[in-house]
Amino acid sequence: MSRILLNLSFIIFHLSFSVSAIAQTTVSAYHPGVTPEGAVYYLPRTALRISVLVERTAYEPGDFASYAQRYLRLQNVSLEPRVSHRVVSIAQTAFGQADKQKAYAVKFNAKTVAANVALADDGRLLSINAEPTAEVQPTTFTPAQKAAPLNPRQYMNEEILAAGSTAKMAELTSREIYDLRENRSLLIKGQADFMPKDGQQLKLMLAQLDTQEQALRSLFEGVTTCDTTEYILTFVPEKPVSREVLFRLSEELGMVDADDLSGEPFYITIEDISQLPPTDEEAAAKTKKKVYESGIYVNIPGRMRSTLHQGIDQIAQAEFPAAQFGNVELLSAELFNKRYTTQLWISPVTGGVERLQADILK
């Protein structure tokens, strides 16, 4: 995370609740950051990062699939390829985004002590006179390394490869499989003509026999492969919602758009579970009129509960502090005058005060 550090030798005060009022300063295009007159910052809104792990299973029939029942007594071996998808897991985390409706300014005034203001890349206020709290980076899904696929033809003997028809190749391959099983049984019983010298060598020989049988059996059973992909969805709650379609999952196509009816819907419900006292609208109106009120604006976050459903089944639920379900309050500029050495840390996710330390100067 990078940030902008501003050296201010002036008092900090609030200019306006609206972006249009900030335009009366010299801020170009309302972009947060340093200006000749001060700086512009945003308070955050709380967004949800939803990680969805989808497993794709693909089946390819083997060359001898039609002979599986005759030679190996394998039942219900499919002769057609197929693909299926399923959700393995869903995880939710919260992160902060700059709320363009909560744009404020820091303006210079030569009567106060120097201050440092730290902003995130998108202009969110992070700290004053202190190193900002590091934003927690999401964990990246890393798929497990897959073994190289086996090539059955590398394990066919000369007689199988020289067979004149598929039926004959299937018959000879099945005999080879039975021979491998017999050799494995003799090794385990200690009756093989060439017994290994020690347990480690026995383990290697058995593993080799298993690999050969697995490769040849795949010609009858087919090959099934599984791949897991992580999809990252961003959802920004503006208000409580009930069972809104978050995404859809098609068994054949995988994850599709929320409006694609080929997929099964997955829903999200957002509840406002804040326990904050109601806002005093009259006091808020008076504060808004004081365009030049001194201080720093911060969020008093509420709380939200996010619940995910697949059909009628609940599959995930989590609670988070949420800036948009709370209030905005003013920290007085008196905290930043020459009588105090004040340090302020702001949550990058909610815009709330994480820590405020004010030391009175002697």
Image: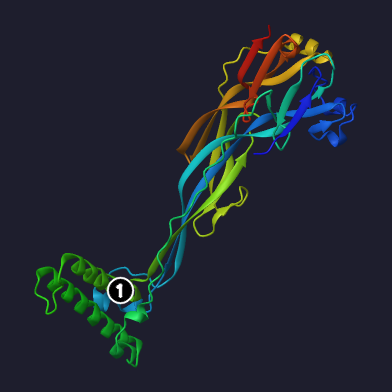
Q: Position of residue 73 (x, y in %)?
A: 24, 73
Q: Would you say 152 lies left or right of 128 here? A: left
Residue 125: quadrant of the picture: top right
Residue 106: quadrant of the picture: top right
> Regarding mark 1 in the picture, which secondary structure is present there?
helix
Q: Would you say 358 lies left or right of 267 here? A: right
Q: Position of residue 66 (x, y in %)?
A: 34, 78
Residue closest to the eye, 153 or 295? 295
Q: Which residue is mark 1?
A: 217
Q: Considering the image in quadrants, where does the C terminus appear?
A: top right
Extreme-front residue of the structure: 362
Residue closest to the eye, 353 or 250? 353
Q: Position of residue 336 (x, y in %)?
A: 73, 14
What residue is shown at x 26% (from left), y 78% (from top)? Answer: 70
Residue closest to the eye, 92 or 43? 43
Q: Would you say 310 lies left or right of 118 here? A: left
Residue type marked 1: Arg
Q: Considering the image in quadrants, where does the N terminus appear?
A: top right
What residue is shown at x 84% (from left), y 21% (from top)? Answer: 108
Tell me if residue 104 can be seen: no
